[in-house]
Structures are given as structure tokens and as C-alpha cells.
Image (cartoon, rainbow, N blue to C red):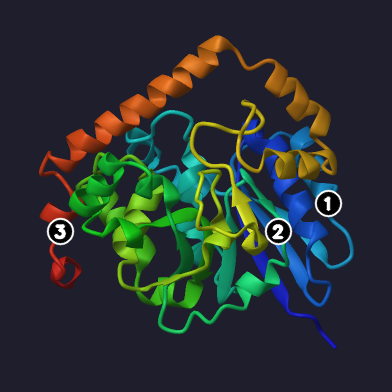
Amino acid sequence: MNKETIPIFFASDDNYIPFLSVAISSLLEHANKNYNYDIIVLSSNINEENMKKIKAYEKEGVKVIFEDVKSKIENIMDDLSLRLRDYYSLSIYYRLFIPSLFPNYKKAIYLDADIVVIDDIAKMYNEDLNGYLVASVNDDVIMSHEAFKEYSREMIGIEPEKYFNSGVLLMNLIEFRKDNIEEKFLHLLNKFNFDVICPDQDYLNFLCKDKVKYLDKGWDRMPIEDKDFDDKNLHIIHYNNFHKPWNYDNILYENIYWECAQKSNCYDEIIRMKGNYTKEDIKRDDEGFINLVNQSKRISSSGFTFKKMIGKDYFKSI
């Protein structure tokens, strides 16, 4: 009997290969053997040595594919780069092009590389997406600060408890194509190129509004204290934002990260990276968070927002 194939996408550059290695290693450790897996890394110019590190995870039932998206974005690179901030690279946008780059897939999982998977990913893949563009989890970072909550309301036009994190997504690729999400994104980028704090994520939240299936928080659990969350429900841990366990001590769920890292083929490299994290790096992170809060406040009050510039019938008129 032929096994169903689950396509799982990541986006990475050379700098993130060690963390991608941990993510893939943890995913495969808990993978359901009743499925095959296509692990597709969306990239641009990853060097041969780093490709080999990730290709090493190939085995029976698991393919690792590198997809160079440079040709897809070369005409819009300046526009894409304009609003990048802090540690972001162009790779954050790659997930938006999955539906057109891979017309053979009906749905797919997208994962950021700063995650570990500690449960069977097929459980997430098998969520019913009928009538939805994506399945995802409300973003705890947005909920953690009043400035970010206000940003969600005033910039995107979404109540903060409905603003989702785009680092863990189950994507209904059929609906993405039917709703022309990529074309709408490129139109908004070309016409407005909004000043945003989470470039791809803000666009996705706006374009997928009212077509989001919200998953249990355990599928995108962030290292933010939550006394109401039961760790028995952990499925994916997402070490997003500035403070990463490979840079800092005393990060929530850091023990799980290091257990997973030890089983990867980049553990020694990650240990060295942590030892080389400087006071200047820490200062930059602290300043980055302050700037993010201030930027959120400025954008929310600017008037140049999705909420104020684009009405609900906007795309019917173009």
C-alpha cells in the first residue's frame, strides 16, 4: 500500500542551518512511520557543506529537497528588503510562494527553523482545513504587551486574540491558489509596502482574516510563562523572538531544546555559538525589543495601516 506523503517546508539561509538541523532531527524522531515525508528547504545560495548536513537526514520514507527561490523573487527583492528589521532575512517571505512553486501539493506544513517537534507531526497535518486558508496558533508575543495588542487592532484590523503566528502553519494550498493570496500580497507590496513589525506574518494575518482555524497552543508553544498551559499538551516548541536558548540561559523549555540539539548533527556548532554570544549581542537584543515596542506604537497611530487604507471590498475593485 502506498503511503501518503506529508510535505513539510522550512526556509533557511546558511546562518540558520544549525537550528534547521535540530528542527528536522526532532521532527523525524517523532514522525509517524505510516507516512512518507518530503522536507523542502526554501533557500537561496546555501553552500554545499551546509546542504550535506541537512541531506544527511534523508532515509527511507524521507526526502530532503532544496528549492532555490531566487528566480521567484529577484524582481521584487528591493521591495521585500525595504521593511526587514533586526535578525530577519528575505527567507521569511518564502512561505508565501509555496502554493505556486509546488502546484502538486494540496496542503502542506510550514515550520520556522527555531522550533523543536516533540510529537507526531501527522496529527497536525490531518487537521480538517475545509473552509480555511490556514490552521495556526494565536501569537503569545502579540498578547504579551499592550503596544503589540494595539498594533494588531490598529495596523492589521484584527483583535489580538485572533492574530496568529506564521512560524507554524498548516496551509490549504488549494484555497491559497483559489483566493489568489500570492497575487494579493504582491499587489499590496508593490502599491503600499506597509511599514510592519512582522513582515510576512502581518500580511498573512490580513490576507487570511476570517479563514483561520486556531489550533491548540501546544502546537506553537512559545517560551513565555503561562500558568494556564499544561505541558502535557506540548507538541511543538517555538523559540521565537529575541531570546533563544542557543544564546541565553534560563529560557523556558531550554532543557528540551538541548536534548533535541544533542541528537542533531550540529550540536557542537551550536554550543560554540552560545559561547561566542557577546555583551554587545545582548545589548543589541535589548535595544531591538525596545525599538519593536516603539515602532508598534508609531505605526498604530500613523494612519498608514491595512485597517485604514484597505477596505473589505478593496480587492473586488482591482
**Residue at the spot of label 1:** 57
Q: Nearer the viewer, residue 65 or 209?
A: 209
Mark 2 → mark 1, Cα distance in angstroms: 10 Å
Question: Looking at the image, which is closer to me, 226 or 21?
Answer: 226
Q: Secondary structure at mark 1?
A: loop
Q: In the image, is 307 to the left or to the right of 175?
A: left
Q: Give the farthest residue toward the front.
A: 227
Where does the N terminus fall, quadrant-wise? Answer: bottom right
The reply, left or right, for residue 141 in relation to residue 10 is: left
Give how far apart the Cα atoms at labels 3 and 1 are. Answer: 45 Å
Indicate the quadrant where residue 272 lies: top right
Question: Foreground residue, 202 or 280?
Answer: 280
Q: Amino acid at mark 2?
A: Ile
Within the image, what quadrant is residue 179 found in? bottom left
In this rendering, position of residue 267 left or right of residue 74: right
Q: Quadrant of the C terminus?
A: bottom left
Front residue of 135/133: it is 135
Q: Are marks 2 and 1 in contact (CB under 8 Å)?
A: yes
Q: Is residue 2 left or right of residue 146?
A: right
105 to 22, vertically: above or below: below
Determine which residue is flagged by label 3.
Answer: 310
Q: Amino acid at mark 1?
A: Tyr
User: What is the crowding at mark 3: few (fewer than 14 residues within 10 Å), some, or many (at least 20)?
Assistant: some
Mark nearer the N terminus (3 vs 2): 2
Query: For residue 39, which numbered disc appears in the image?
Result: 2
Q: From this viewpoint, which residue is outermost toward the right?
A: 60
